[in-house]
Image (cartoon, rainbow, N blue to C red):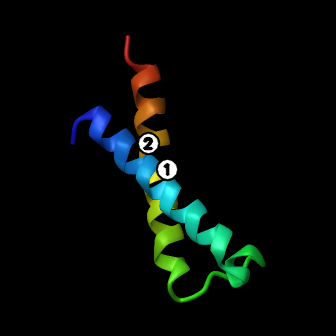
Amino acid sequence: MARESEFIAYMRAFEASTTHLGACPACQNDQPCATGAPIHSEFIARQDAWNKRVRAERKQP
């Protein structure tokens, strides 16, 4: 996956997570609902992958 498309997927996952969070009282109370749990998990996974990529790129000369 190209760097740009990986970043776009990360930002889309962020948007989905925050949109759901803003509309879901359970998720706002730190208790992800059945719908929100996979949305938030996807965001966290994409965020972790992005951060890993950025750290790896910093180590390259």
Q: Residue at x 66, y 79 (%)?
A: 24
Q: Quadrant of residue 13?
A: bottom left
Q: Residue at x 53, y 68 (%)?
A: 40
Mark 1 closeness class: few <14, some 14–19, many ≥20 residues within 10 Å: some
- Give the Cα separation between the discs numbered 1 and 2: 5 Å
Q: Is residue 1 left or right of residue 37?
A: left
Give whichever of 37, 17 is nearer the camera: 17
Picture coordinates of residue 9, whole percent (x, y): 36, 49
Residue kind at label 1, given as amino acid type: Gln
Numbered label attached to residue 47:
1
Q: Secondary structure at mark 2?
A: helix
Q: Residue at x 30, y 33 (%)?
A: 3
Q: The C terminus lies in which quarter of the figure? A: top left
Q: Is residue 36 above or below residue 60?
A: below
Q: Is residue 9 above or below residue 5?
A: below
Residue at far bottom of view: 34
Q: The N terminus lies in which quarter of the figure? A: top left
* Residue marked by disc 2: 50
Residue kind at label 2, given as amino acid type: Trp
Numbered label attached to residue 36:
none
Picture coordinates of residue 4, whole percent (x, y): 30, 33
Q: Are marks 1 and 2 in contact (CB under 8 Å)?
A: yes
Picture coordinates of residue 8, whole percent (x, y): 36, 43
Q: Is residue 31 left or right of residue 8?
A: right
Q: Residue at x 45, y 47 (%)?
A: 11
Q: Is residue 24 above or below residue 22?
A: below
